[in-house]
Image (cartoon, grey):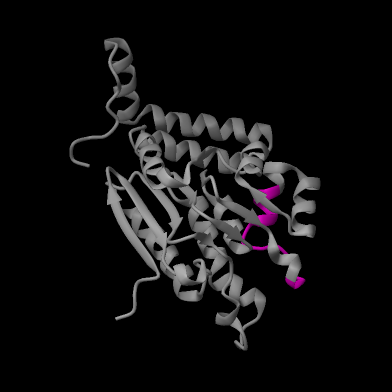
Amino acid sequence: MSEAVITETTQAGVRTLTLNRPDRLNAANDALLLALTGALRRADAEESVRVVVITGAGRGFCAGQDLGDVSGRDMTFTEHLNHTYNPLIRTIRSLNKPVISAVNGVAAGAGASLALAGDLRLWAQSASLIEVFSNIALVPDSGSTWFLPRLVGYHRAFELMALAERVRSEDALRLGLCEQVFPDETFAQDVQAYAERLAARPANALKLTKQALVFAQTSTLDEALDQEAALQQIAGDHWEHEEGVTAFKEKRPAQFVRDAQ
């Protein structure tokens, strides 16, 4: 039996999904993209999973589309994106749990889009990102035109896309493309520790916070205010809020993970 293109492990409420085509720098084929989307949806349905990490096996995070996989295929570019990449990116953004992109190596093309799609982006020291689409006269896709300018501004995003410039970890941190950079030698352990910190936070409140942020990115201020008010009621009615207030009054750390989980 062939090795799985996505491997899954779970520890302390953290589900780690690893792209597993290391001999191809985890370049994406249909099997990998569909398997990753399915794994994310399964994680979303499991109450015990509180945080999802996406990372890559070997030296690369994701080298983008495996061009050999689509060469000669009787499918348009639009059909291919709508069948594979677009459902994946939509799943990440709509997931009811925080998604961490743990960028352990090169993230290129659609792999760069995947790296940017996480709610949080953690990079290894040797990681890099490159929007390679213009090298083969294509348009950035899989969400890059939406994510990148919101992070670095229109002009810098255009430059990175037009010139296909490689962004290394020190510049990624400065530009806001990642939240943390960890040493290569301890990257997996550092990501797990970070994810476990996040998993200990109030899951319902983080779910609603993600919903509010995603909504606000395409709304007016008035719409965002109304959405905040509605979501705040949901949060306030949840047991997490009572626990947080009680813990504050009792001067103890709040316990947002129930034993049943």
Find residue 32 and report its horizontal and vertical position in percent. 45, 70
Question: Residue drawn 27% across and 27% down?
Answer: 255
Find residue 127 and report its horizontal and vertical position in percent. 56, 51
Question: Residue drawn 54% across and 73% down?
Answer: 83
**Quadrant into which the N terminus falls:** bottom left
For residue 85, above or below residue 251: below
Residue 219, visible in the rendered structure:
no
Question: Residue drawn 53% across and 57% down?
Answer: 90
Camera-side residue: 238 or 152? Answer: 152
For residue 220, above or below residue 32: above
Camera-side residue: 61 or 154? Answer: 61
Q: Is residue 107 left or right of residue 149?
A: left
Q: Is residue 239 left or right of residue 188?
A: left
Residue found at the far front of this picture: 185
In the rendered structure, does residue 172 fall within the stretch colored magenta?
no
Find residue 228 and report its horizontal and vertical position in percent. 54, 31
Magenta-highlighted residues? 136-148
